[in-house]
Amino acid sequence: MKIIKMLWACLVLITINSFSQKVQKAAFQVVPLGVMGGIDEKNLSAYLLAPSNTKDYICLDAGIINSGIEKAIENKVFKVPTSEVLRKYIKGYLISHAHLDHVSGLIINSPADSSKTVYATKKCMEMMENHYFNDQTWANFGDEGPGFHIKRYHFQTLNIGEETPIANTAMTVKSFPLSHVNPYESNAFLIRNNDDYVLYLGDTGPDAVEKSSNLKELWTAVAPLIQNKQLKGICIEVSFPNEQPDQFLFGHLTPKYLMDELHELEKLAGKNSLNGFKIIIMHLKPPAKNIVKIKEQLKTQNDLGLKFIFPEQGKSFEL
């Protein structure tokens, strides 16, 4: 009887330890503030990302903010007022490119925001300064660019491929160029928390259509992180179903082109390296029948064992 009790105790300890390890695997919390690629102005691209068990969020793109926070509060993700999430929880913004569906929330909410940093690469920052925060189209809430500087935001330019600390968080970011209707530049952000990573891509077309090697170079950079189980997921757009002609992709992906690109990634990371790997699908464009078709085509063409996640506005998940 004593031996049986000892064995039972050991089994319980092993089970608890195993469960604890599984729980600890989640490194990041994601709160989608907006998930669509248009035309709903209340649901445009914006994702909050923080290390697990913290409220130190960086906002990945900012097509929408206020309405997205309200949705998250409705879903019990946050238990404080909208203004407190905006002013205290969001520590800064990473802007992949300056198209309005990725920055309109940042612009409109700037008068109510607190002091923080906006991160973008040079071309993106110049577009925001010259066309939005220019003291004409909108007051210049930054500390650079035309007109009077309100200095609510510190505009920090990211150098491609250089790791940069994200202020008031434990995270860092490294940017990579993407082609979004060549030669227009979008960007991908590799965010690190200790030894764990998430890869977030702004709008991008496939290399084959864009006549570019940007995605190939990005996959080459992150393949070792997949091999080492350090990359927790890839957030990437799929805007149109496969029926969309190449000349009308306008720098976006279809399920077929996404799978083509992920096959290239698997070649670099190793056979079966993407089995069970999380791919967060963003920027689906209405109408609703196209969104249904995109999801069906991804499911049908998933020959890599990928775990597709389709974020819902205001509903958090972990990576």
Image (cartoon, rainbow, N blue to C red):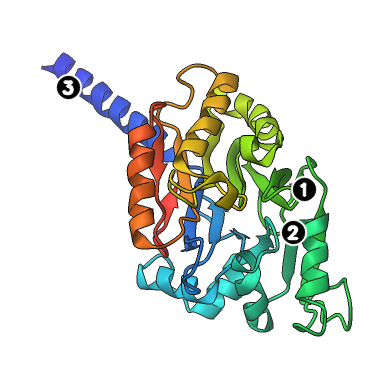
Which image quadrant for residue 127?
bottom right
Q: Amino acid at mark 2?
A: Tyr
Q: Amino acid at mark 3?
A: Lys
Report the residue marked by disc 2. 119
Residue 259 horizontal/vertical position (percent): 48, 33
| Disc number placed over residue 177 in the picture, else none | none
Circle nearer the viewer, 3 or 2: 2
Q: Is residue 27 visible?
A: yes
Q: Is residue 117 above or below residue 245?
A: below
Report the residue marked by disc 3. 5
Which image quadrant for residue 58?
bottom right
Q: Is residue 125 above or below residue 153?
A: above
Q: Earlier in the sequence, mark 3 or mark 2?
A: 3
Q: Is residue 265 above or below residue 242?
A: above
Q: Earlier in the sequence, mark 2 or mark 1?
A: 2
Q: Label 1: state its secondary structure.
A: strand
Circle nearer the viewer, 3 or 1: 1
Label 3 packing within 10 angstroms: few (<14), some (14-19), many (20+): few
Q: Report the front residue among 54 and 284.
A: 284
Q: Label 2: state its secondary structure.
A: strand
Q: Residue at x 47, y 51 (%)?
A: 240
CA separation, marks 3 and 2? 58 Å
Q: Earlier in the sequence, mark 3 or mark 1?
A: 3
| Disc number placed over residue 164 in the picture, else none | 1
